[in-house]
Amino acid sequence: PGTDSWPNLVGQDGQQAVDAIKKETGLLFTVMLNYSMIECLGFTDVTIIPPGTGVTEDYRTNRVRVYVDAQGKVDLTPSIG
């Protein structure tokens, strides 16, 4: 709670960083809807961004971008926005 960036993930595998953000913040959970189990995310957008990928510059509180290098390792501190 209260975390808006994850500097400890720099250098780690991108997908593992995404999973760690979801687990640490408790963002992945399952709910029952019309007798079906569905997964829900607190952040609607936790995305790996490969090198050279263009992104919008708008700030969104439901988004975390995980920038990775050519080897898929986290290159910049992931943060909300």
Image (spheres, grey):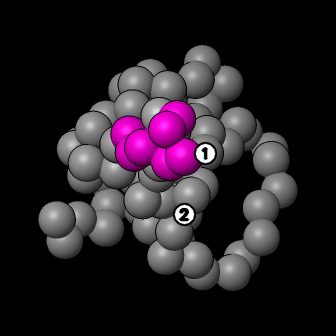
Say above or below: 80 vs 68. Answer: below
Q: Identify the residue position indicated by label 1 in the image.
A: 47
Q: Residue at x 60, y 18 (%)?
A: 71
* Number of numbered discs on residues: 2
Q: Residue at x 57, y 58 (%)?
A: 44
Residue farthest along the top direction in this orientation: 71
Identify the mark at residue 36; answer none if there is no mark.
none
Q: Are marks 1 and 2 in contact (CB under 8 Å)?
A: yes
Q: Is residue 65 magenta?
A: no
Main SS, magenta residues: strand
User: Can the viewer see residue 2 in this picture?
Assistant: yes
Q: Helix, strand, or loop for circle 2?
A: strand
Say above or below: 20 vs 32. Answer: above
Magenta stretch?
30-36
Local packing at callout 2 (Cα closer than 10 Å; few below 14, some 14-19, many 20+) is some
Q: Identify the residue position indicated by label 2 in the image.
A: 63
- Amino acid type at circle 2 is Arg
Local packing at callout 1 (Cα closer than 10 Å; few below 14, some 14-19, many 20+) is some
Residue 72 placement (x, y as % from top left): 58, 23
Say above or below: 71 vs 69. Answer: above
Q: Is 67 situated left or right of 58 in this image?
A: left
Choose between 58 and 69: the one closer to the eye: 58
Residue farthest along the front direction in this orientation: 35
User: Can the viewer see residue 67 in this picture?
Assistant: no
Q: Residue at x 70, y 37 (%)?
A: 50
Choose between 6 and 2: the one closer to the eye: 2
